[in-house]
Amino acid sequence: MKHKSTSKKNTRKIVNPFEFTKNENDTRIYKYEYTTEHIIADEKNNLDKINDHKLNNSIIWLNIDGSNIEVIKNIAALYNIHDLLLEDILSHGQRPKYDEVNDVIFTLLYMLYYNDETKEIEIEQISIALTYNTVLCFQENANKDVFKNISALLKNKTSKLRNRNADYLFYALLDTIVNSYYKVIEKLGIEIENLETTIIENPRQDAFKRINQLRKELILLKRNTLPVRDLIAAIMRMENNLLEERTKKYLKDVYDQIMQANELTENYRELTMSLQDLYLNTVNLKMNEIMKTLAILTAVMAPATVIGGIFGMNFEKMPIIHNNLGFLITVGLMILIPIFMLWWFFYRGWFKKEY
């Protein structure tokens, strides 16, 4: 589910969580059936043949791309997915969660993408169900192949995916989703570094707007990654025959990664706060520099103003008023005194920038 903001208003478009496509052509179903020696990859258009298995003792990965409600319901019925889990799959916008119902381990979490054009994070809800020798994966977007690395590994006969049980595939899918967080965090980190340079060199108003936008993106990132930590921890503590102990060791690595991702997210949030302070301080310093320049100009012009005001008064008797050199002396004072003042200010270091 993509969340986009308009160019005029810095608000995020909220998609109706119960708005599903009615066209089955918008949903793609990929079936991977594999053993140690063989693999069959096929795009299924006929739900009646989804349960047809051609390999003995094979592992099934069914990847459903799209949100067609009828297709999802039919697949859930074929694999005995409980109605509570089906409701979670169809109810978009939920908090990342896990559940265990009728020998099915179910997880709901979000794949994250960074849009380089809009400079925003896009999210896609993904539901993964692990049952005996079968992994079901429900993705919102039918146009994004987020698990292409998994399908590539399955084609490699020597990969661990081909030589382990379905729980290892379940782990690999979770690991891919968590790795997507790092790609987003890396992009945001580059944005923050570039913004810091921009603020120091030229603190424009649009830089302040970008700081606030980055803070909102980091809040969105944290809201979708922080619950995943508890989700992975709960799966690791789970006592279920579907999960082997050796697979839980790999889940421990995913847990460490999500912990690090949350720490980086929090660090970047604090950094954006520091950027906001840096922006305000830089603007204040620049304003002080402008005020100092105006003060120097005022001080330099003051002697000429005073001299011109004195000798412009209507008195008959004034010093050097009837002197032939009076005009030159007056103008000379108006020029020499400001020059002396400028030299004095330079000598005292008033022209040095403070930043």
Image (tube, grey):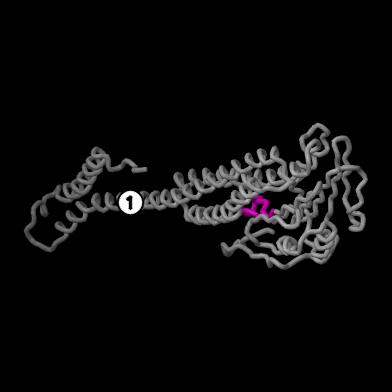
Which image quadrant: the C terminus? top left
In the rendered image, is residue 315 in sight?
yes
Q: Nearer the viewer, residue 162 or 298?
A: 162
Residue pushed farthest top? 158
Q: Nearer the viewer, residue 98 or 327?
A: 98
Which image quadrant: the N terminus? bottom right
Q: Secondary structure at mark 1?
A: helix
Magenta-highlighted residues: 107-122
Judge left or right: residue 125 versus residue 297.
right
Residue at horizontal 73 percent and vertical 57 percent from the top: 101
Task: Please name the residue that numbered disc 1 is placed on.
Answer: 288
Which amino acid type is marked by label 1?
A: Asn
Image coordinates for residue 150, horizontal then vertical, percent: 76, 42
Judge left or right: residue 290 versus residue 250.
left
Secondary structure that dominates the magenta span: strand
Image coordinates for residue 131, horizontal then vertical, percent: 78, 51
Residue at horizontal 50 percent and vertical 46 percent from the top: 267
Q: Nearer the viewer, residue 327 or 265?
A: 265
Image coordinates for residue 52, horizontal then vertical, percent: 92, 51
Label 1, residues with CA under 10 Å away: few <14, some 14-19, many ≥20: few
Magenta run includes residue 143: no
Residue 95: name its quadrant: bottom right
Magenta run includes residue 120: yes
In the rendered image, is residue 124 in sight?
no
Image coordinates for residue 279, horizontal then vertical, percent: 43, 51
Query: In the image, is residue 239 above or below residue 38?
Result: below
Judge left or right: residue 91 versus residue 198.
right
Residue at horizontal 86 percent and vertical 39 percent from the top: 35
